[in-house]
Image (cartoon, rainbow, N blue to C red):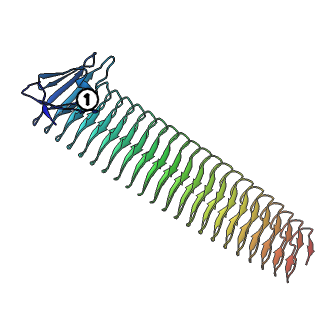
């Protein structure tokens, strides 16, 4: 039950809610309608003085342990100050309807903005802040705060401390600040910055823009076409559904694109990247990366470093970049370039186009009618099954056509060529070549040089 407390006043009404046998008695101050100016001052002994539009109300240390301030309707200004040495008060501030300005103090306060476009600063302490409906501006301040933006396009800054932040519905702008924060953008097109610290960030529904900042962060974009940057640190990033743009930045990152046509850049560091379903564009960046394109027609570039690349299913275009790379095209008609470095390339199933690039490469075409170019370097090439077209390029190459009716050119260099099964056409071209046609009706041409041919 509520009964009048013996604190009469013109500017506010004070009521008491008894706690019963086990509960704690609650003291409620109601400022009422109007644009009120409310000052809450905590004294050293734990008692609290509340001034409403110049009229003071005193609450003892015991009464302040469960004190509720209701600003009521109107555009109110509420300010909390002071601190207690020992017994800390437990104060809840309710802004009510209106565009309120609420400043928390040094204690652990509960602040509810209510409806309206409110401006709330929790101040020092571990605060629980709810913006309510409206386009609110909320600062957690120092301390480990819990912040609920509510409905509306809110601007939230957690400040220092390990904060839990939920943006709610609306297009929110959220900063975690310093500390290990947990941030959920909620529905809407949100902009989220984790700041310094090891943060957990969930974008939720909507086209979100997320920056993890410094620290080892875990980021989940959720549904929508998200733009995600991990920042410095070893991050774990999942884009979720949608056509996402993800950059790992500096650090050894684990990146999962999820469903959708994603654009992923691992950045610096030794990254693990899984494109997921969709036609993805993936760059490993600098570092020794592990990349799996997943299903879809993907474009993959390993970049600098010794990378392991798996194209997965689909017609993929893969470039190993600089470094000694291991590349598997997977199923589909793939285009694979080893580029610089001593690469190991397996085309997999499908009619693949493979170029080893510079370096001493080991190339296997796999099943399918493949086009294989060793390019520069002393390459080892196996066409596999299918009617393959193979060119060794410059260098002393070892070429095996495998089964099928193959066309093989050794080109420049002292090459060793085995046609394998099938009716093959083999030309050694320049160099002192050793050629074995194998089974089948083969046509052999040693070309320039001192060649040895076995039909």
Q: Position of residue 53 (x, y in %)?
A: 11, 26
Query: Considering depth in this image, is 432 or 189 the residue closer to the camera?
Result: 189
Query: Considering depth in this image, is 130 or 287 the residue closer to the camera?
Result: 130
Residue at the far left: name it.
10
According to the picture, the residue beneath numbered tag 1 turns out to be: 66
Q: Is residue 287 visible?
A: yes
Left or right, 36 with reference to 393: left
Q: Position of residue 84 (x, y in %)?
A: 30, 19
Left or right, 386 with reference to 329: right
Query: Considering depth in this image, is 31 or 425 the residue closer to the camera?
Result: 31
Q: Position of residue 190 (x, y in %)?
A: 36, 49
Q: Position of residue 405 (x, y in %)?
A: 78, 80
Quadrant location of the C terminus in the rendered image: bottom right
Left or right, 309 with reference to 212: right
**Residue depicted at x 78% and y 68%:** 382
Left or right, 363 with reference to 208: right
Quadrant location of the N terminus in the rendered image: top left
* Residue 102 drawn above or below residue 150: above
* Residue 202 drawn above or below residue 417: above
Q: Secondary structure at mark 1?
A: helix
* Residue 393 drawn above or below residue 25: below
Q: Is residue 266 visible?
A: no
**For the image shown, how many numbered marks are present on the structure?**
1
**Residue depicted at x 43% and y 48%:** 202
Residue at the far front: name it.
21
10 Å crowding of disc 1: few (<14), some (14-19), many (20+) = some
Residue at the far bottom: name it.
441
* Residue 174 drawn above or below residue 451: above
Q: Which corner quadrant of the image does residue 318 belong to?
A: bottom right
């Amino acid at each position: 039950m509520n009964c009048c407390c013996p604190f009469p006043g013109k500017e506010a009404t004070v009521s008491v809610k008894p706690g019963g046998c086990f509960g704690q008695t609650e003291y409620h101050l109601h400022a009422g309608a109007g644009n009120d100016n409310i000052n809450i001052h905590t004294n050293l002994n734990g008692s609290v003085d509340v001034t409403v539009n110049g009229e003071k109300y005193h609450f003892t240390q015991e009464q302040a342990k469960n004190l509720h301030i209701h600003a009521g309707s109107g555009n109110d200004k509420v300010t909390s100050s002071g601190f207690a040495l020992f017994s800390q008060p437990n104060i809840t501030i309710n802004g009510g309807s209106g565009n309120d300005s609420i400043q928390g103090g040094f204690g652990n306060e509960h602040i509810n903005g209510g409806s309206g476009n409110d401006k709330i600063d929790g101040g020092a302490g571990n605060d629980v802040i709810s913006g309510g409906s409206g386009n609110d501006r909320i600062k957690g301040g120092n301390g480990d705060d819990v912040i609920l933006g509510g409905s509306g396009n809110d601007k939230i800054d957690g400040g220092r401390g390990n904060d839990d932040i939920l943006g709610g519905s609306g297009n929110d702008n959220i900063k975690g600040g310093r500390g290990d924060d947990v941030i959920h953008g909620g529905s809407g097109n949100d902009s989220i910055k984790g700041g310094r610290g090891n943060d957990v960030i969930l974008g939720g529904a909507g086209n979100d823009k997320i920056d993890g900042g410094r620290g080892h962060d875990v980021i989940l974009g959720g549904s929508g076409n998200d733009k995600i940057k991990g920042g410095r640190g070893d991050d774990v990033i999942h884009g979720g559904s949608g056509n996402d743009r993800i950059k790992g930045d500096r650090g050894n990152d684990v990146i999962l694109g999820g469903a959708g046509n994603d654009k992923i850049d691992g950045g610096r560091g030794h990254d693990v990247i899984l494109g997921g379903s969709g036609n993805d564009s993936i760059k490993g960046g600098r570092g020794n990366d592990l990349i799996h394109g997943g299903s879809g027609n993907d474009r993959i570039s390993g970049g600098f470093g010794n990378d392991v690349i798996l194209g997965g299913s689909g017609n993929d275009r893969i470039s190993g970049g600089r470094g000694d790379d291991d590349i598997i095209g997977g199923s589909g008609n793939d285009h694979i370039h080893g580029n610089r470095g001593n690469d190991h390339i397996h085309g997999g199933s499908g009619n693949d186009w493979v170029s080893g690039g510079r370096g001493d490469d080991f190339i296997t075409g796999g099943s399918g009618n493949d086009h294989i170019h060793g390019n520069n370097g002393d390459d080892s090439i196996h066409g596999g099954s299918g009617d393959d077209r193979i060119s060794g390029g410059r260098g002393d190459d070892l070429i095996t056509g495998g089964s099928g009716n193959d066309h093989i050119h050794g080109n420049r260099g002292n090459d060793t060529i085995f046609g394998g099964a099938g009716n093959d056409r083999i030309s050694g071209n320049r160099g002192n070549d050793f050629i074995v046609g194998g089974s089948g009706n083969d046509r052999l041409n040693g070309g320039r040089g001192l060649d040895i041919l076995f039909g």
